[in-house]
Structure formats: C-alpha cells, structure tokens
C-alpha cells in the first residue's frame, strides 16, 4: 500500500472510537437549523485538540472552519450536523459530521508523515442544511474562495461515488373558500378543505404511474382546522432526476 494511503487508513482506525463517540453525542442531542451550538462546540474542540487552526462561528453563528497545513492544493471536507424538527437525525447528519472529522484527521496525519507533501486540509462546518440554505450563505461569504476541491459524503444503503442529483420544484397552493353557517345555509359555503383534500388525493393517485426516481410530497402549511373550512395551504415538493418547469 502507498505510504500516504497507509497513513490515512491507520488514522481512521486509530480514531474509530473518538469518531463514534462524536457522532453518538450529536445524535443524542439533535439541534435544528441555526441552533447547532453543541455540535459546533464539540467538533471545533476535537479539531483544536488535533492541532487545527480553528475559527468558530465562521460566517454563521454555528458555522466553523478548521485548517491544517500550508501551501496547496487545499482539500475541504464538509460537515453537516443539523437535525430535522421532531425527527432528530433521521437524515444522518451526525454521520456526515463524523465522516468529515475523520477524513480531516486522516489527511492531517498523511501530511505529517510525508514532509515533502505540501497542501492544506480544511474541515468546514456548515449549519442549516435542512431548510436554511447554510451552504449557500457560507459560499456567498467566501468560505471556499481558497479551496481547490470539496468533498462530502451522505449516509445511504449503498456505496455510490457519483450519486444522481435531483431537480426540485416547490409549489405553494392557497385554497380559499366562502364562509357560511353549516347548519342554516350549508349550500352557500365553499369548503377550501375539500379542494385541498381532492388535490392531495389526486397527487397521491398519480404516484403509481411515476418513475421510481420521481418523488412528490405534500406538506400541510399553516393550516388550522375551522368549522367554516375557508382557508388552508399546502406545499407540494417535486423531486425529479431531470429539469422540470411549471
């Protein structure tokens, strides 16, 4: 095995327990977008102890940047660590953070063991992936201006070096009805909830005719039950493996 590759493998094995402890701690204390303070502090602490130059609260309050080495090229490993509301780390961002930390520590050891090897490794903590556009905000803030390559992994049931990227379209629909007393004059009412339910069931019925890679989800948004049924909103999220236009 190549000496650099051997150093990387040895570092991963050496840090296995540490990495598992870190991801488990993040998993036990899920924090939603822009509130990932415990995860931020835990990851920056471990990177600081490993000898990285750490900038906490980088661009965003719960973002961070940790850098090691000199010269170039510069490889950046991206860490996510925000959780889903109510569902916790069902999307596995605790594992993404673990992978970014582990890869950063491993590449650092490779640089240490090869004095003639120049370059820098950056571990970039990006908050608010779930609905907060954290990466976009950090990109606009210049987080990657001196980086040559960016790497991130996402947990999955299979290993895939080049996963497909899906186009996303979000459509918000407002259903407006007409109020009427349901006992005295029900025929005069227009029930917005009926329209919303019909739209939802129609979208659900279409799924059997869709390709496996197509995903359609409907979310209730700001809906409060009312005896009049005059207003409700849905958000329809469509994911396809090709560009779509509405």
Image (spheres, grey):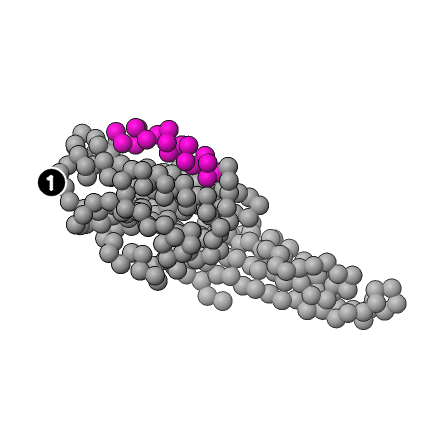
Is residue 16 positioned above or below 73 on the image? Answer: above
Quick check: is 11 in the magenta stretch? yes
Nearer-the-camera pick, 53 or 118: 53
Tag count:
1
**Residue that badge 1 annotates:** 116
Is residue 100 positioned above or below 203 on the image? Answer: above
Instruction: For label 1, count other residues whose C-alpha is less than 10 Å away and answer few (under 14), some (14-19) or many (20+).
Output: few
Image quadrant for the N terminus?
A: top left
Secondary structure at badge 1 equals loop
State the image quarter where residue 117 is shown. Answer: top left
Q: Residue at x 58, y 55 (%)?
A: 218
Query: Which contiguous range is marked in magenta?
Result: 10-27
Quick check: is 137 in the magenta stretch? no
Residue 73 visible (yes or no)? yes
Rendering coords of residue 26 (x, y %): 46, 39
Q: Residue at x 51, y 40 (%)?
A: 29
């Amino acid at each position: 095995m190549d000496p650099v590759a051997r150093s990387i493998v040895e570092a991963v094995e050496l840090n296995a327990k540490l990495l598992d402890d870190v991801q488990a701690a993040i998993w036990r204390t899920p924090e939603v977008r822009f509130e990932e303070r415990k995860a931020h502090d835990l990851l920056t602490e471990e990177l600081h102890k490993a000898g990285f130059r750490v900038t906490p609260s980088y661009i965003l309050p719960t973002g961070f940047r940790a850098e090691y080495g000199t010269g170039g090229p510069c490889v950046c490993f991206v860490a996510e660590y925000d959780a889903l509301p109510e569902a916790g780390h069902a999307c596995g961002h605790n594992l993404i953070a673990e992978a970014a930390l582990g890869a950063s520590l491993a590449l650092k050891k490779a640089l240490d063991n090869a004095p003639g090897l120049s370059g820098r490794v950056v571990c970039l903590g990006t908050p608010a992936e779930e609905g907060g556009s954290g990466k976009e905000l950090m990109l606009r803030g210049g987080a990657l201006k001196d980086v040559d390559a960016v790497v991130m992994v996402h947990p999955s049931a299979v290993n895939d070096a080049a996963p497909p990227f899906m186009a996303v379209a979000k459509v918000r629909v407002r259903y407006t009805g007409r109020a009427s007393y349901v006992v005295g004059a029900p025929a005069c009412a227009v029930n917005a909830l009926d329209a919303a339910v019909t739209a939802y069931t129609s979208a659900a019925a279409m799924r059997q005719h869709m390709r496996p890679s197509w995903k359609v989800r409907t979310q209730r948004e700001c809906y409060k039950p009312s005896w009049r049924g005059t207003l409700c909103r849905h958000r329809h999220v469509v994911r396809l493996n090709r560009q779509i236009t509405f």
